[in-house]
Image: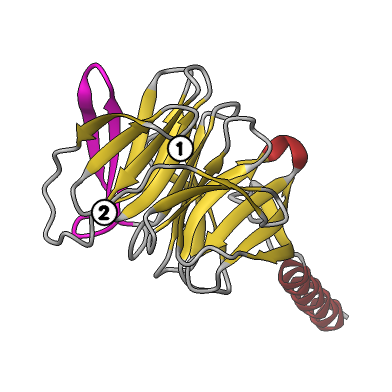
Amino acid sequence: MKLYITIIFIFLLAFNSCNKDEAILDNPEKDTNKIYDIKLIDSKLLSIAEPSGLSWALNQIDFIVVDDRTNKAFVINKEGTVLSEFPYSGDDTEGVTVDIDSNEIWIAEEAKSELIRLDMNGVQQGIYKIGVDRNSAKKGLEGLTYDSNNKVFYILNEAEHGLLIKWQITNGIISEKQLDFAQDYSGIFFDNADQNLWIVSDKSKKLFYCNKDAIVKQSFDLDYQKAEGVVVDIAHQRVYIISDSEHKLYIYKITKL
């Protein structure tokens, strides 16, 4: 009798153990690192030769795009239609941002490591040299964005080395951080409401959500090459990314999880 009870007990213990293992397999632990979900919902073909930087326009409705081939800057709408062209003509234009408080446009020129300051009509007002060490003239300033609350520009050095540079007009470079989470760094956007950064990588084909010190909180795969600029509009659940090689403005829906 005792042997019979022992056999039944062992059988029940083994059965319950199997069920527990199956439950664990069927209900894996939720990924607690996921903050946002993004889904591609549309894309717009651009008539711009090599779109290499993206920013809100001063009206915070349309966009400014810089063209690395013609070295011009354009205002486009969300359909990708060119609305206007600035008189500015630069040299190796890669990044763009705006200061809505002063109604100014700022452009990053890669080869000379310079920021160009324009008025609202696109007329040049100043040139600022960004002194960074790099191994190649073609791996320089690539992305530009502005924290209007703290009056700080965030500048990306593309590679060799990949850097996040914090810079102010009055103080110059206030910090540099070497980046190591992607193969290169091609576009950046600072969310003034959220106080966080969004960075795209051309070669890694990824979008990264980071804090102000470029610590990655979440990453997202992109299924196309040459992502060069990004704008994020959390209030309207949209992310906009431009691709140089595809000549497109990609539109995503972003949802907080």
Residue interval drawn in magenta: 156-180
Residue 188 x %, y %: 45, 46
Q: Nearer the viewer, residue 1 or 237?
A: 237
Estimate the spatial distance between the alpha carbons at disc 1 and disc 2, rounded to whole Å: 20 Å
- Relative to 170, is 239 on the left or the right? right
Q: Main secondary structure of the magenta part?
A: strand
Q: Is residue 125 above or below residue 214?
A: above
In the picture, which quadrant includes the N terminus? bottom right
- Mark carried by residue 162: 2
Q: Which residue corresponds to the image point at 73% horizontal and 35% vertical from the top-left?
A: 235
Q: Is residue 122 magenta?
A: no
Give the secondary structure at mark 2: loop
Mark 1: amino acid:
Thr
Q: What residue did someone put label 1 on?
A: 97
Q: Quadrant of residue 96?
A: top left
Say whether disc 1 or disc 2 marks the residue closer to the N-terminus: 1
Local SS, label 1: strand
Q: Is residue 188 left or right of residue 117?
A: right
Q: Is residue 14 above or below residue 226?
A: below
The residue closer to the viewer here, 146 or 65, is: 65
